Amino acid sequence: MRFWRLFSVVSIAVLLTFSSGCSRRVTDHEQISPAEKIIIKFSHVVAENTPKGLAAKRFANLVQERTNGLVEVQVYPNSTLFKDGEEIEALKDGSVQIIAPTTAKIAALFPHWQIFDVPYLFSSREAVFSTMAGPVGAQLFSELQKQGFQGLAFWDNGFKQMTNSVRPLVRPADFQGLRMRVMMGSKILEEQFLSLGADPVQMGFDQLYAALKEKRVDGQENTISNIYSKKFYEVQPYLTLSNHGYMGYVVLTNQKFWASLPANIREILENTMAEVTIWEREQAARLDKENFRALVATKQLQIHELTAEERKAWQQALAPVYRRAEEIVGKDLLETVLRSERKD
């Protein structure tokens, strides 16, 4: 896909062709009227100071600059426009033009994307990127088109950790009886907590802080940047550095909307998205380290990092998830990723 290649982008003069069949010539980009602008609403559910939040803002700024204001990307963070469970429908009906849900949240429509929810499947961020750059990534992106979506990029947020308010999570038995929030849509994530003896509770991200504070759920899994930016440390005194699962985002648009854009506008958007994707991954790695230091500095957490022996015990307890994953994502897809990991 050409959006994975970087190009130098220059200011342009364009002929706007609208899907309604009419057209207008823009002769002065410094005095673009509201009727001539292309407005793109970009909705997401996390804070602005996270990898996704920063990347969405950078994308908006670069697009504004590179089209001389012809295209305006309006970013709506923190579920201010649409919440978990609402974004997909909003993208379908044209209420929003770009979203960036986690892979787990598109599971109802695209079960194969749950491959990223399989615990301890990926050894590193680089292994994930390699997978997405190869045949597996091509297959997953092609599936999006069958439902009228266009995949624009795959963004990173690193590996997930466990938090809770009851006790340190060191051994698999420590999960027994805990109510753990899971992202909506992923059967594999539910299976993960069931295998550990916990009770999975599906819940939107926007509801999570209140649910943790009010003890409606005992704990949750998330990346360091989300734990820090949403201040979960205020209501979750126990943090286990488990690196058990990966969290990535699929940047999506509506296929019909994308096709309605002039070709030269699409090219600018694709090239800018490719550039921002590389930058976003760098920010994800940086924030993972910086936010962890900030979490330590709060002195509100008891932090435990799994030893090699403890990690092995978790992997053994989670082995049943792989059998369930074969049913959900398919044995061939799972084996392809496993073979790739063994090579690495």
Image (cartoon, rainbow, N blue to C red):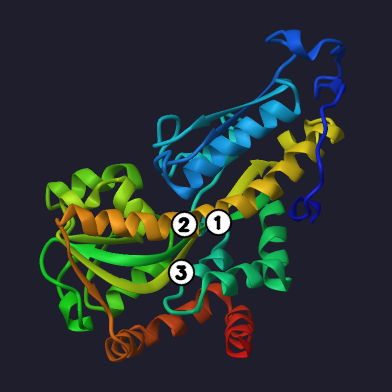
Mark 2 vs 3: CB contact within 8 A: no
Number of the label disc, if any, that sits on residue 255: none
Asked if 1 appears above or below 38 in the picture, the reply is below
Give the quarter of the image for residue 219. Answer: bottom left
Asked if 282 appears above or below 50 in the picture, the reply is below
Mark 1 vs 2: CB contact within 8 A: yes
Residue 203 visible, this orientation: no
| Of the pair 292 and 59, the residue shown nearer to us | 292
| Of the pair 310 and 218, the residue shown nearer to us | 310
Please tell me which residue is depicted at 70% across the width and 20% down the height of the picture.
Answer: 69
Q: Which residue is mark 3?
A: 117
Q: Position of residue 25 (x, y in %)?
A: 88, 13
Please tell me which residue is depicted at 34% across the width and 60% down the height of the picture.
Answer: 222
Please tell me which residue is depicted at 76% across the width and 44% down the height of the picture.
Answer: 271
Distance between mark 3 and mark 1 Cα atoms:
22 Å
Three-letter amino acid code at disc 3?
Asp
Disc 2 is placed on an element classified as helix
| Of the pair 183 and 108, the residue shown nearer to us | 183
Looking at marks 2 and 3 on the same chain, the residue that comes earlier in the sequence is marked by 3
Three-letter amino acid code at disc 1?
Glu
Asked if 234 appears above or below 264 in the picture, the reply is below
Q: Which residue is mark 1?
A: 282
Q: Position of residue 145 (x, y in %)?
A: 71, 52
Distance between mark 1 and mark 2 Cα atoms:
6 Å
Give the quarter of the image for residue 82. Answer: top left
Please tell me how crowded label 2 is: few (under 14), some (14-19), or many (20+) other residues with Cα within 10 Å.
few
Compared across the picture, whether 328 is left or right of 5 comes to left
Distance between mark 2 and mark 3 Cα atoms:
23 Å
Looking at marks 3 and 1 on the same chain, the residue that comes earlier in the sequence is marked by 3
Asked if 141 appears above or below 172 in the picture, the reply is above
Q: Position of residue 113 (x, y in %)?
A: 56, 64
